[in-house]
Image (spheres, rainbow, N blue to C red):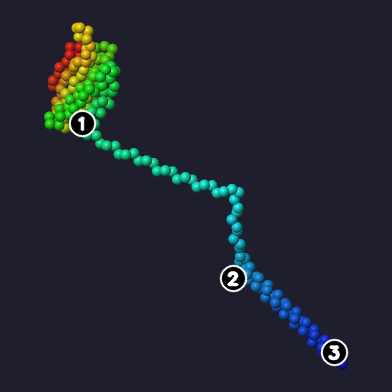
């Protein structure tokens, strides 16, 4: 009887060991499953994607795109005669007598090639200074015509000034009337030319006694 009892006891112990072994194997399988989920196939620990950090306030508004700059319209090209008129007006400047415009009239005859300019001579402290101013004006007019694109043949310049007659009446009268042919103008070396000779080299000249 003792042998039988010992056998059953031994059999019960083996059964318990078997059940313990099954539990251990089950735990090992669970552990391996968890490890497989945590560690990828390449052996590295899987990293969690970090959540975006919460901002304290709203995102700043995008910068406004600057508006395109307006392109100025192209400047219209002036006809040669109009461009010359403006160049002469700019060169002579403003009249200091304020009675007539500095350039009273301007014309170009395309048939004859004659440039006609009438301007108002500025006043000055003395007669000599007034005459020199008129000569400087003529010099400026001739140089602007020479530099222009006009096919001119001659320049006719008329200068006016305010004169008083014997009765005390004041009127704007022609005091300088000079004409220069193109070939005469082309001979002038402006760098060395003496302005005092301006009326002397004219191809035609009519001067008031006060402007001789």
Q: Residue 49 in the image: state x and y as whole percent.
A: 59, 61
Viewer-nearest residue: 39 or 190: 39
Q: Residue furthest left?
A: 112
The residue tagged 1 is 81
- Between circles 3 and 1, the one closer to the viewer is 1
Dot 2 crowding, Cα within 10 Å, few <14, some 14–19, many 20+: few
Question: Callout 3: few (<14), some (14-19), or many (20+) C-alpha neighbours within 10 Å?
Answer: few
- Quarter of the figure with residue 146: top left
User: What kind of element bears circle 3?
Assistant: helix
**Residue 5, which numbered label?**
3
Asked whether residue 192 appears in the rendered view, the answer is no
Separation (CA) of disc 3 from disc 1: 142 Å
Near-viewer residue (186 or 153): 153
Residue drawn at x 22%, y 34% as measured from the top left? 79
Asked if residue 165 can be seen in this view, the reply is yes
Coordinates of residue 190 in the picture (x, y in percent): 22, 25
The image quadrant of residue 91 is top left
Q: Earlier in the sequence, mark 3 or mark 1?
A: 3
Q: Residue at x 27, y 14 (%)?
A: 124
Dividing the picture into quarters, in which one does residue 29 lie?
Answer: bottom right
What's the residue at 50%, 47% (across, down)?
A: 62
User: Which quadrant holds the N terminus?
Assistant: bottom right
**Pointer 2 residue:** 41
């Amino acid at each position: 009887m003792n042998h039988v009892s010992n056998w059953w006891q031994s059999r019960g112990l083996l059964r318990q060991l078997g059940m313990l072994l099954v539990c251990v194997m089950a735990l090992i399988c669970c552990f391996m499953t968890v490890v497989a989920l945590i560690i990828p196939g390449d052996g590295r620990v899987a990293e969690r994607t970090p959540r975006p950090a919460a901002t304290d306030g709203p995102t700043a508004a995008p910068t406004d795109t600057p508006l395109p700059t307006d392109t100025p319209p192209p400047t219209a090209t002036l006809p040669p005669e109009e461009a010359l008129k403006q160049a002469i007006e700019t060169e002579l400047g403003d009249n200091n007598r304020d009675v007539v415009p500095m350039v009273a009239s301007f014309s170009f005859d395309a048939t004859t090639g004659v440039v006609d300019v009438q301007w108002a001579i500025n006043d000055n402290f003395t007669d000599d200074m007034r005459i020199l101013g008129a000569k400087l004006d003529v010099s400026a007019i001739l140089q602007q015509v020479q530099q222009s694109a006009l096919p001119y043949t001659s320049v006719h310049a008329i200068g006016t000034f305010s004169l008083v007659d014997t009765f005390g009446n004041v009127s704007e009268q022609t005091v300088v009337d000079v004409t220069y042919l193109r070939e005469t103008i082309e001979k002038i070396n402006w760098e060395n030319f003496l302005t005092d000779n301006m009326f002397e080299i004219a191809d035609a000249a009519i001067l008031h006694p006060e402007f001789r």
